[in-house]
Amino acid sequence: MKQKSPTHHDPRRDESPTLTHLDAAGAARMVDVGHKAVSAARIAGIMAAKRCGDLIPLCHPLPIESVEVSFDIPQLEPEHEEPVRVHIKSTARITAKTGVEMEALTAVSVAALTVYDM
């Protein structure tokens, strides 16, 4: 007769999986991301600027030389239930016959969407 091998107990399986966008009662909620860094949003903005020609119809793909994305988050917990304001600035540089404003605007837009999603 073959013996059963002992099963390994994984304590992580003791907790039931939860969805981050639902509270204990199952109601939808926005996840508090105040503790997360903005580095993922910065990377998303830079990547978006580099792919602007793929995202905006009839926009020329440009050989971007540099893209910077910076954030100014003056107050994460404003008083009197005022909204949190995030200022995002992007600077894109290129040597070409055309402007690079669409790449900078795309970088800011995608960075803002990433902050919202995070």
Image (tube, rainbow, N blue to C red):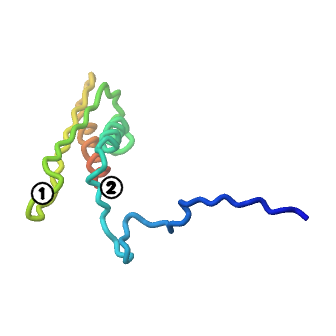
Q: Nearer the viewer, residue 82 or 4?
A: 4
Which residue occupies 33% across, 55% down? Answer: 117
Where residue 97 appears, as percent x and y from the top left, is 25, 25
Vertical relation: 65 (above or below) 4 = above
Q: Quadrant of residue 106?
A: top left
Q: Quadrant of residue 25?
A: bottom left
- Under circle 2, the secondary element is helix
Q: Nearer the viewer, mark 1 or mark 2?
A: 1
Residue at left offset 49%, top offset 66%: 17
* Above or below 82: residue 47: above
Residue under pointer 1: 78
Few, some or many C-alpha atoms within 10 Å of disc 1 (few <14, some 14-19, many ≥20)? few
On the image, the x and y values in percent for residue 79 come to 9, 60
Give, as a three-letter code, the residue at label 1.
Pro
Q: Residue 38: x, y in percent? A: 28, 44
75 or 65: nearer the viewer: 75
Residue 51 located left or right of residue 35: right
Residue 81 horizontal/vertical position (percent): 12, 64
Residue, x 13% and y 47% (percent of image)? 74
- In the image: residue 56, left or right of residue 93: right
Residue at the limit of the structure toward the right, as seen here: 1
Amino acid at dot 2:
Asp
Residue bearing the label numbered 2: 117
Residue 107 shows up from this direction: yes
Residue drawn at the location 16% of the way across and 56% of the way down: 77
Say the numbered circle drawn on residue 5. none
Res. 58 visible in picture: no
Q: Residue furthest bottom?
A: 25
Badge 1 element: loop
